[in-house]
Amino acid sequence: KDIEFIDSYYYNKLEVTRFDSNLGKYVGYTEFGVKQADYWNNNPSIIGAMMAQREAYCLNNVGIDYRTA
């Protein structure tokens, strides 16, 4: 549970939207980002795909990053 997958979207060095696997949804930080987050959060296939990325990317690589010496 302590592994978190974050996918952030930026425009002009400003974070617009972020997916947070602990929340299980997108969060918007600008007016446009809030609209995008609402659209993506209402599409279960997008949320499911992002949650699958946590397992595919993070959980498969955690053993590589945290090897014991």
Image: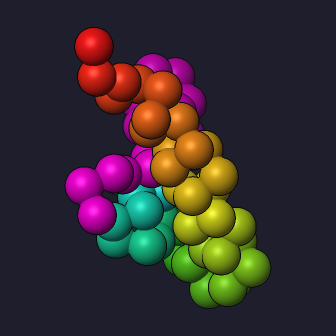
The residue at the point 34 percent across, 51 percent down is: 3
The residue at the point 53 percent across, 36 percent down is: 61
Residue 56's x, y, as percent? 65, 52
The residue at the point 57 percent across, 58 percent down is: 55
Q: Is residue 17 left or right of residue 40?
A: left
**Residue furthest out toward the front:** 69
In which quarter of the view is residue 67 placed? top left
Q: Quadrant of the N terminus?
A: bottom left
Residue 19's x, y, as percent? 48, 57
Q: Is residue 55 left or right of residue 65?
A: right
Q: Is residue 60 left or right of residue 21?
A: right
Q: Main secondary structure of the magenta part?
A: strand
What colour scheme governs how the chains and residues are painted in the rendered image of this protein?
Answer: rainbow
**Res 34 visible:** no
Whether 59 is drawn above or below 37: the answer is: above
Is residue 49 in the magenta section?
Answer: no
Q: Nearer the viewer, residue 35 or 58?
A: 58
Whether 69 is drawn above or below 57: the answer is: above
In which quarter of the view is residue 63 placed? top left
**Res 13 visible:** yes
Q: Nearer the viewer, residue 12 or 5?
A: 5
- The magenta region covers 1-18
Q: Nearer the viewer, residue 45 or 40?
A: 45
Whether 44 is drawn above or below 23: the answer is: below
Residue 62's x, y, as percent? 44, 38
Q: Nearer the viewer, residue 37 or 32?
A: 37
Q: How many marks?
A: 0
Residue 2's x, y, as percent? 25, 55
Q: Quadrant of the C terminus?
A: top left
